Amino acid sequence: MAEILKYDRVDIAYNGRRVVTGVSFDLQPGEILGIVGESGSGKSTVIKAAMGLLGPSGTVTRGDIWYKGKDLPDLSPAEMRRLNGPELGMIFQSAGASFCPIRTVGAQLYESMTEHESVTKADFTHRACELLQKIGFEDGMRILNSYPFELSGGMQQRVGIAAAMLMNPSVLFADEPTSALDVSVQKQVVEEMLLVRESFGTSIVIVTHNIGVIGAMADNVLVMKDGQMVEYGETRQVLDDPREDYTRTLMAAVPRLRRD
Ligand SMILES: Nc1ncnc2c1ncn2[C@@H]1O[C@H](COP(=O)(O)OP(=O)(O)O)[C@@H](O)[C@H]1O
Ligand SMILES: [Mg+2]
């Protein structure tokens, strides 16, 4: 199968200082790739580069990031805005923080959807309820009618994933989506992302320092240290038989969510 996303020897610098060197990986349709590594190893930078979110000081200085025949770092900001959302979705560590506190979740999801396509309120409600149900919410209508403060942090995070999926992106980037959550809720977020892949065939790149999350959902894992790849391969192989001491140390630091 042809890959949907391909990083080819990517270097990234902020203000001329290189922080990522020679990162290469392929993402197949429906694949879940985990990126792990200690804080500051360049995980967020790697995924921000695909979405054009490096900010004014950040640049891809070498290599290519191919998505459906386009080299993403070459795109104009306007072209990038067209891809972000409908093609490349993103969820952050604290989705809750991006909701406006005084408007219902439904009103906010509807608004973000109409930024990219014209859709009637009735169609939106139908689609949103269907989507929420597919990814494990029992009562979608209740979620849409809720104010953010009526939802727990874990629930807000799960709704953040639903919000990204409303536009049905081909690739979903998730930067530490479970890090702010209790262990029990982390598991729900992992389940939800697995349902996303199952229902929509979405490819997912998940950044986390939790090896447990990787073990529970990733097909492949890329281990980063000081902006470089130290290991890249099938999750089972990397977790069960890591080639590098660094990977071993990362694994020792956190319990796995599930062992099988
Ligand atoms: N906007 C920025 N400007 C300058 N340096 C940055 C910026 N963002 C990240 N960095 C630096 O780039 C390196 C990688 O950071 P980051 O990608 O956030 O790592 P991680 O997500 O693995 O914690 C770090 O040294 C960090 O300090
Ligand atoms: Mg980060």
Image (spheres, helix red, strand yellow):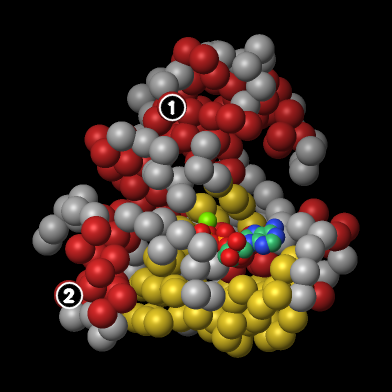
For residue 70, side relative to residue 78 (left or right): left
Q: How many marks?
A: 2
Residue carrying label 1: 153
Nearest to the observer: residue 39 or residue 75 = 39
Residue 202: horizontal and vertical position, in percent? 49, 58
- The amino acid beneath tag 1 is Gly
* Residue 50 sits in quarter: bottom right
The residue drawn where x is 58% and y is 68% is 46
Q: Nearer the viewer, residue 210 or 41?
A: 41
Residue 243 picture quarter? bottom left
Q: Residues within 10 Å of mark 1 (few under 14, many from 20)?
A: some
- Is 99 left, or right, of 190 in this rendering? right
Residue 240 tag number: 2
- On screen, 106 above or below 83? above
Residues 229 and 15: in front is 15
Query: What is the x, y in percent for residue 144?
Result: 55, 20
